[in-house]
Image: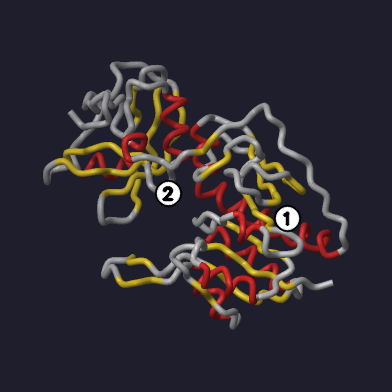
Amino acid sequence: MSLRVVFMGTPDFAVPTLTEIIGQGHEVVACYTRAPAPGGRGMAMRPSAVHQVAERFGVPVFTPATLRDPEVVATLTGHEADVFVVVAYGMILPQNVLDLPELGCLNLHASLLPRWRGAAPIQRAIMAGDQETGVAVMKMEAGLDTGPVAMAERVAIGPDMTAGELHDRLMALGADLMVRALAALSRGALSFTPQPEEGVTYAAKITNEEAAISFDEPAARIHALVRGLSPFPGAFVMAELGKGPERVKILRTRLETGEGEPGTLLDDEGLVACGEGAVRLIQVQRAGKGAMSAGDMLRGARLGAGGRLGAGGRFA
């Protein structure tokens, strides 16, 4: 049985779920997403990824600044949806909105709840050194990702997997999981299990200060930081490359053996000594430029073995 669905989502991560729901024959009666924001080199107003896809499918798009406005709530009520599906929407649903659909509000969350509730579960899982994570479909309630879970799928986190790679894996898996949940919901066969009280962690937003690399840290921690923040926002060092200090993102690293004063370049190809062990810089990105190999960047800047990277992530 097909359902009347209001879909709420914003970034690329939500797009496969929207397209799968439509592809499975459910009636998406409205799509709610964040309002267009400036982006790109010209900083032109750009609609969200979900906004663009919804328009291609002819789904009416709404971009309210808040869901607390009585007129917005009245419009939501008028959709007469069976269920709201929420995927990385970026706005809080107040209780009166959560109560609107007869079958409730389902949320796709990119972690194995209750671990990594909150805004940045993919990045936090990798940065913490987790060896697995996953996606979960839960029934939304007023608390932050506290609702009972209906279905979940696990994914191993490889030793060199980046947040971008994990994002894409979970994005596809999550879309499949949500349409399976909706199929069960339409048959009255979707059951929910309360989250355990133990094991709760929170995935706070990434701060600029966290993204700065300190080579005083153990190599394993730096490697996890780089992977967790690649490709966005990107762990970084401040580098003197001939035109004054500039921020250089470190997009890929590899753990290798090596010893030296933290921040010392141990060869000409980007092997850097850390507080414990060493990391090899593999791929970097200078401001306003494309990704390139760390070796090419260092050769261009005439930095090689014996050069120093400061403990706070700055070239000395």
Give the quarter of the image for residue 147: top right
Q: 208 or 119, which lies in front? A: 119
- The disc label shown at residue 200, or none: none
Q: How many marks?
A: 2
Mark before the other along the chain sequence, 1 or 2: 1
Q: Count residues near mark 1 (Cα–Cα under 10 Å), then give few for <14, some for 14-19, many for 20+.
A: many
x and y percentages locating residue 96 in the rendered image: 61, 59
Answer above or below: position of 33 versus 196.
below
> Residue at the spot x=77%, y=71% of the render?
3
> Residue at the spot x=47%, y=39% of the render?
204
* SS class, disc 1: helix
Answer above or below: position of 33 versus 141.
below
Which corner quadrant holds the C terminus? top left
Q: What residue type is labelled 1?
A: Leu
Q: In this view, does 255 lie to the left or right of 37?
A: right
**Residue hosting label 2:** 231
- Asked if the residues shown at circle 1 and circle 2 are in contact, with their CB atoms under 8 angstroms apart, the answer is no
Q: What residue type is labelled 2?
A: Pro
> Residue at the spot x=64%, y=69% of the render?
6
x and y percentages locating residue 179 in the rendered image: 74, 62
Which corner quadrant holds the N terminus? bottom right
Q: Is residue 181 left or right of residue 132?
A: right
x and y percentages locating residue 207 in the rendered image: 36, 40
> Residue at the spot x=40%, y=28% of the render?
279
Question: Looking at the image, is mark 1 or mark 2 nearer the viewer?
Answer: 1
Q: 285 or 62, which lies in front? A: 62
**Residue hosting label 1:** 177
Answer above or below: position of 221 versus 145.
above
Q: How far apart are marks 1 and 2 (CA)?
A: 25 Å
